Image (cartoon, rainbow, N blue to C red):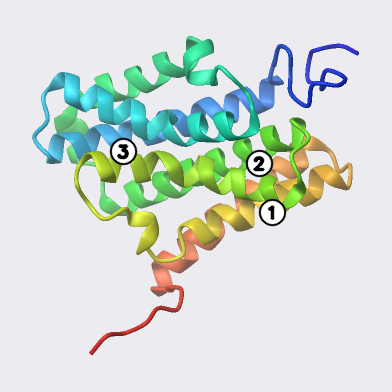
Amino acid sequence: MSDDGELKKGTGRFARYHPDLLLLIVDLAGALVFAVEGAMAGIRAELDLLGLMVVAFATALGGGMIRDLLIGAVPPNSVRDWRYPVTAFVGGGAVFFFYQFFQRVPTELMITLDAAGLALCAIAGAGKAVEFGINPLLAVLMGAVTGVGGGTIRDVLLTHVPGVLRTDVYAAAALAGAAVVVIGLKTKLPRSLVMTLGAATCFTLRMVAVSRGWNLPKVIVH
C-alpha cells in the first residue's frame, strides 16, 4: 500500500504521513489564529519576547501535539514539519511587533477569530484521527483535544483556570464540529463538504452560545 494518506499494513499507524492539501491548510490556519491569541495573552501577562513566543507556540500547536502523541503520529507535526512552528512564530512575532494594531481589533472580532480557530483545529484533528484508523468516538474526542488543548496549556502557563473548564459552550462546540467530520468521513461523503459542514457547525454553535450567553449546566454553591 502507498504510505501517502494510507495506513501501513500491520502497524496501526502511518510509516510516513503526508496530509492532503486541504487538511494541511486547515491545520495551519487554525494554528495561526491560536498563535495570535496566545501572543496577545502573553502581552497582557507582561511576558518578554521569549516568553511570548513560548506561549504563542504552545497555544498554536499544543492541542495538535497532544493529539499526535495519543494517536501514535510521532514525532508530532510541530516537531517534524517546519511549516507548523514557523506559522506559530510568525503569528507570535506579528503580535509582538505590531501590538498596537492588534490591540485595536474589536473584542467581537477576536471572539469570531477564536471561534474560527476552534473550528479549524477541531475538524483538522478529527480528520487526522480518522485517517489514522482511530475509533469514531475517540476520533471525535481527538478533534476536541486539538481545538482546546493549546488554550488549556496557555492558561496553565499563565496560571489561570483553563477557559475550557468554564467558558460557555467551547469544548462542546468543538465536539459537535468533530462529530460532523467523523460521521461524514465514515459515510464516505466528499471530504471538502464534510470539512466545511464540520467547521460551520462548530463555528455557528460557538458564536450563538456567546451571543445568547449559553452555558453548560453546573452546580451552584450558595
Q: Is residue 38 left or right of residue 168?
A: left
Q: Nearer the viewer, residue 103 or 165?
A: 165
What distance separates the C-alpha of mark 2 from that of mark 1? 8 Å
What distance separates the C-alpha of mark 1 from that of mark 3? 25 Å
Answer yes or no: is residue 173 visible: yes
Q: Nearer the viewer, residue 46 or 222?
A: 222
Q: Is residue 56 left or right of residue 132?
A: left
Amino acid at circle 1:
Ala
Q: Earlier in the sequence, mark 3 or mark 2?
A: 3
Q: Are the residues flagged by discs 2 and 1 in contact, CB closer than 8 Å?
A: yes
Q: Earlier in the sequence, mark 2 or mark 1?
A: 2
| Disc 2 target residue | 126
Q: Nearer the viewer, residue 15 or 197?
A: 15
| Disc 3 target residue | 37
Picture residue at 25% right of the left edge, 19% below the top:
93
Residue 143 % position (x, y) = 60, 44
Amino acid at circle 3:
Glu
Picture residue at 36% right of the left edge, 35% below the top:
59
Amino acid at circle 2:
Ala
> Disc 1 on helix, strand or loop?
helix
Residue 99 % position (x, y) = 17, 30
Q: Is residue 109 left or right of residue 137?
A: left
Residue 175 % position (x, y) = 59, 55
